[in-house]
Amino acid sequence: MQTKPFRIGTRGSPLALAQAFETRDRLAAAHDLAPEMFEIVPLATKGDRMTDRPLSEIGGKGLFTEELEAQLLSGDLDFAVHSSKDMATRLPDGLELRAFLPREDVRDAFIGRTAPRLLELPHGAIVGSASLRRQALIRRLRPDLEVIIFRGLVDTRLRKLAEGQADATLLAFAGLKRLNKDDVPTELLDPKEFPPAPAQGAIGIECRIGDSRIQDLLSAINDGPTYDAVMCERAFLAALDGSCRTPIAGLATCHGEDLHFHGVILTPDGQTEHAVEVSGTLADAETLGRQAGEKVRHAAGPSFFESWT
């Protein structure tokens, strides 16, 4: 019987803490435990501290998880809660993504200061975004716009926008909803025209492989369709060696026992793209994602990827 609180690792941002508290509340309800049986342990990560440069220049997605994963491996944490789209495709030996909460809205939110819609921005307007995927998709739709780097927490980016550092910015609608800021967007972008990042909107929970006590604890709150969709999308990323250095979009949707995946890779200027669609069963989710990645890599040819380096 558990006598001391389970230790939940998380980044210390308001969004990360909201995700950790949601995880705690779901676990407490599922196992009929008091919330005090879960201790939330915020940690500052390199990605949080280094906000002056693009992630692609300082090490990519692992910068948001390194400290958490080190404490998982040492046993100082029982499990860690992440925004799944921030997770590297290759996890440290001994760790796994064990569970996912039900996925939130996957759409990107456009927040316009000088126009309410992306296509209505004036010629040459400035859009702030730290995501290479969003930058490429913006340039695909509006090559006339100037795209600048916007990093920082949600409130930091909204403050920069209000100060006039850009005419617009984009954020994940899921994060805004979790922060009770779902009234902030001026437009929600259609995933068919502006596909999301793989695993966007999904909260993932990471633990040690073979820790059956924690695995059983987490299994009670795992959402099956989200798990299958994210595993498909991460397999697509892995087949392309996807990271923060690469403009990649992908979305898997589940309908009963069936899964459909749509993925896109782009050059950073947004002017060349290759898309892929595959369908199959949930049981083959990871295989489908990997096959989609291999298919689009073959279609693009080796020269396409030179722009990613």
Image (spheres, rainbow, N blue to C red):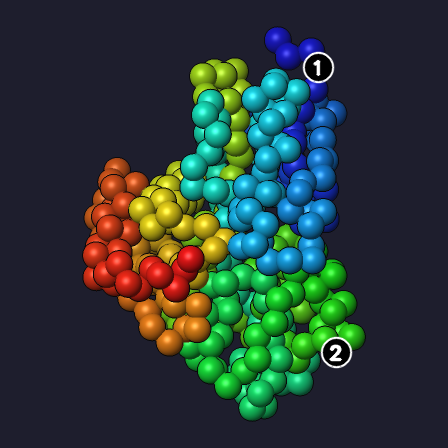
Say what amino acid the circle numbered 2 marks: Gly
Say what amino acid the circle numbered 1 marks: Lys
- Label 2 neighbourhood size at 10 Å, few (<14), some (14-19), many (20+)? few
Quarter placement of the N terminus: top right
Is 79 placed above or below 132 here?
above
Is 17 placed above or below 123 here?
above
**Residue placed under numbered mark 1 in the picture:** 4
Quarter placement of the C terminus: bottom left
Is 173 placed above or below 7 here?
below
Q: Residue at x 70, y 19 (%)?
A: 5
Can you tell which quarter of the image residue 194 is in? bottom left
Closer to the camera in the image, 94 or 218: 94
The mark nearer the N terminus, 2 or 1, is: 1
Q: Is residue 260 left or right of residue 52?
A: left
Res. 2 in view = yes
**Residue placed under numbered mark 2 in the picture:** 164
Q: Is residue 101 left or right of residue 76?
A: left
Is 43 placed above or below 264 here?
above
- Label 1 neighbourhood size at 10 Å, few (<14), some (14-19), many (20+)? few
Outermost residue, top side: 1
Give the image location of residue 138, x and y in percent. Answer: 49, 74
Dot 1: element? loop
Q: Residue at x 67, y 69 (%)?
A: 184
Can you tell which quarter of the image residue 246 is in? bottom left
